[in-house]
Image (cartoon, rainbow, N blue to C red):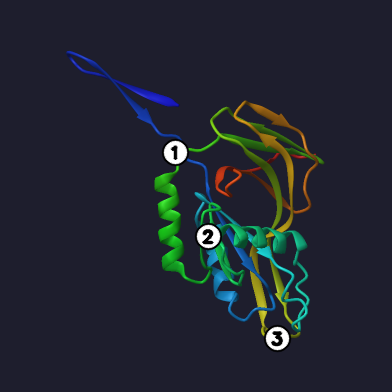
Amino acid sequence: MLVRLVAFASCLLVAPVVTSARPVVVELFTSQGCSSCPPADAYLSELSRERPEVLPLAFHVTYWNSLGWQDPYSLEAATQRQAEYSARFRESAYTPEMVIDGQRRLVGSNRRAAEAAIKQAQEADEAGVDVRGVRHGGTLSVTVGPGTGRGQVLVVGYDTGHVTRVGRGENAGHALTESNIVRSIRSVGEWTGAPLKLEPASPAGEQAAILIQSPDGAIIGAARVANEGP
């Protein structure tokens, strides 16, 4: 941690300067086949454009695909991830659903509730586990700092944004603009409190992020991956 020294006539005070905290992870479970989802998608897009202190990720689920429109970005891994959260929360899955830092769930279009949950996560977090990632062509260089606890190291690949014209289903005729669309998620290792270095393959997707998720589902570390060319 950086410190700033301030001298007084009779004493020397040391005041901490807090470095930027890790981003709050906002996961949106959505589908292009769901007519209630576009307002939540729009909110997530705003977060991606305007809120660097937040890491928004759109997980497109598969269970709407049989209801009129095949979402081109739907992933079975997204459906499974939401199912795991539903089991932890002991509540049914739905769209649009937001999960904040793996600990709070709410209706994704409820901006007031989402902002309150994001603020609560920011106030509760004490910097978390230090995580850094750099992409070198087809490989990521991931470093995780020391700390207490344990968790899975997850690599998430996502596209910055797409516009899709929907031909069928509840959103037929609409052009949907969506951001931070998850294209892949996988576990690449386990962090057990000691410093850790990993070099997994780059994930599918234009951008990448690293998450550290504890056994109870809480996100205890997160970082966007920097791109450093081929």
Q: Position of 163 compared to 214: left or right? A: right
The residue that label 2 is drawn on is 47
| Comes first in the chain, label 2 or label 3 | 2
Disc 3: CA contacts within 10 A as few (<14), some (14-19) or many (>=20) = some
The residue indicated by pointer 1 is 126
State the residue at coordinates (76%, 84%). 68
- Mark 1 to mark 2: distance in Å? 22 Å
Point 58% across, 57% down: residue: 88
Q: Amino acid at mark 3?
A: Ala
- Camera-nearest residue between 107 and 92: 92
| Dot 2 alpha-carbon crowd within 10 angstroms: few under 14, some 14 to 19, many 20 or more | some
Q: Position of residue 56 (x, y in %)?
A: 58, 57
**Identity of the residue drawn at 58% across and 79% down:** 36
Which quadrant of the view contains residue 180? bottom right
**Where is the N terminus found, in terms of image quarters?**
top left
Q: SS for tag 1?
A: loop
Q: Nearer the viewer, mark 1 or mark 3?
A: 1
For residue 172, the mark is 3
* Residue 214 shown left or right of residue 164 in the figure: left
Residue at x-position 62% and y-position 36%: 132
Residue 159, percent from left and from top: 71, 58
Is residue 180 shown to the viewer in this render?
A: no
Q: Is residue 222 above or below residue 14?
A: below
Tell me which numbered mark, 1 or 3, is placed earlier along the sequence: 1
N-terminal-most mark, 1 or 2 = 2
